[in-house]
Amino acid sequence: MSTCTLSSSLSLALSSASWSSASAASRSSFWYRRMAAARWALPETSFTDTVADAADSSAAATAEAVQTSRAAERENLISPRSPIVPPPGPPAMAIGPWLLEPQPGKMTVAWTTLEPSVGRVWYGTPEPDRLATEEGPPVTDHRVVLASLQPSTQYRYRVEGGYETAWFTSAPAAGAEGPVHVLVYGNNRSNDGDHALLARAAAAERPQLALHTGDMVANAREESLWRVWFQEEHDLLAHAPIVATLGNHEITDAGAAYARFFQRREFPAYASLDYGPVHVVVLNAFEMQAGGTPHWGGISDAQKAWFDEDLRRIPPDRHVWVLVHQGPFAHPAESRPEHGGSDEVRAVIAGAQKVHRIQAVFAGHEGFYERGEVDGLRYFVVGGGGAPMEEPDARSPGVQKTATALSYASLEVCGCHTRGTVKDIAGKVIDAFTLSDCATPCSVPLSPQVAVSAATSGQDADDSSGSRRRSHKRRRRGPLDDSASAAENRSR
């Protein structure tokens, strides 16, 4: 073998041995073979193949070790005990959010999820920088109380699992004069097209508090109807807390959905609320009797006793409003069973008037707007929330104003002043009224009293008639009658 060939073979062997990271013993064996090859003149191919075999064997061992190490790493990654696996995020929101139970220093945020979880809400002013966490085990119906709020202050909040940041104005301090802006509406009954228009117009008012006169959906047992209702109410109820009374369409499931979405937990369906200068009393005119049947238009003795006691603790200068679905008076042009005013509700409220003056009663149940006064009691029927329109009897005793239109009432209260307007979905003023006034000015000037336009001075304006036609047309093609019970059909 020539010197050149030997040098070339030596370089190749050194390079192969270094690349394969052979052990010291292997290197010694290599030099022994190298010397033997030079002494006995072994064929160059035999020497080269031997070195290559050693390198291949060492490389295979190294590759096998690497594969074993990677397999162990993969096993560690998928192990449930691994600390590097991120925790799952909050489940997606199914319904909501909406606001409930405004109190001095507190507000409740409610929403639902498809999977159980513990609710968490970020809130603060001007940005949500505080965290409120739901108490108790994971649930799908969530209510989180936001505490330590400053009075009459705008706060921003965000529900974990939601996609947006909303805002609300916190409740006034206890006994504060206001001003407060309250919206009253109701009688939607899953007439989705008209209800969506009404909800959008009401949300544009930006009220601080929303009072609902009942009949949110056509059938309270249908979860899908509630999903649509909350979706259409989102722009209103994500910013203004709702106080609702139980309607006859909410008793199809014995009030279960009403309790789930609106009722204070561990409280009956009747309650009261102080909001600045206003005291709102919510009555239940459909209490369940023995056997699980509702008492239509009735107030139990227990509820009546609670009502009287509640009014006894109210200061004499407080504005007292009663919210009830079937009110003391209503005058539909077409007489039907279980419609019109309730004699029992009328008697209970008349008795309560002896305890504390009631400024106004707000009711729904009928598909029209009516304002009147009988025996010193001022009442409103606010039922133009989307359900099929009906004709009121404007000639009945005590009736002061009627309209057949998709509509809502907007009231402003400050100190001893209470003013209100009723508007249709186009923003046209249907009615304007003053419930109380005095010589003492409010520290914050109220909005100028809006005059009723000449176009709406009669019972129906052009827009009102159009709303009535739309409601009847949608009602004829609505699919809800098939799922409603005979009792529900009678109550329409």
Image (spheres, grey):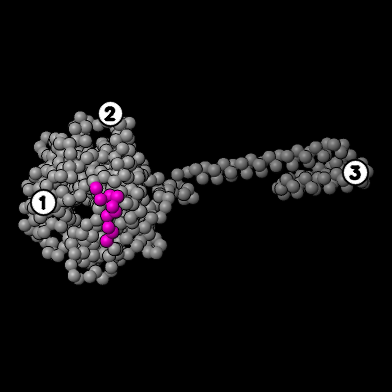
Q: Assess disc 2: are there few (<14), some (14-19) or many (≥20) residues with their C-alpha within 10 Å of its C-alpha.
A: few
| Cα–Cα span, label 3 and label 1 | 125 Å
61 left or right of 50? left
What amino acid does circle 1 point to? Val
- Circle 2/circle 1 CB separation < 8 Å: no
Q: Residue furthest right?
A: 2
Which residue is the site of mark 1? 374
Residue 474 marker: none
Q: Which residues are magenta?
A: 449-458
Front position among marks 2 and 1: 1
| Residue 245 % position (x, y) | 20, 47
Q: Check contact, mark 3 vs mark 2: CB within 8 A.
A: no
Residue placed most toward the observer, 94 or 72: 94
Disc number at residue 5? Answer: 3
Q: Quadrant of the N terminus?
A: top right
The residue carrying pointer 3 sits among few (fewer than 14), some (14 to 19) or many (20 or more) residues within 10 Å by Cα, namely few
Q: Is residue 290 visible?
A: yes
Q: In this rendering, which labeled residue sits more in front, label 3 or label 1?
A: 1
Q: Earlier in the sequence, mark 3 or mark 2?
A: 3
Q: Position of residue 50 (x, y in %)?
A: 79, 38
Q: Nearer the viewer, mark 3 or mark 2?
A: 2
Viewer-side residue, 179 vs 379: 379
Q: Position of residue 391 (x, y in %)?
A: 22, 40
Secondary structure of residue under mark 3:
helix
The disc placed on residue 482 is 2
Check disc 1: other Cα within 10 Å, few if <14, some if 14-19, many if 20+: few
The answer to which quarter of the image holds residue 196 is: top left
Residue 301 in the image: above or below residue 443: above
Q: Give the residue drawn at x 81%, y 42%.
A: 33
Asked if the magenta segment contains residue 323, the reply would be no
- What's the magenta bit mostly, secondary-structure-wise? loop
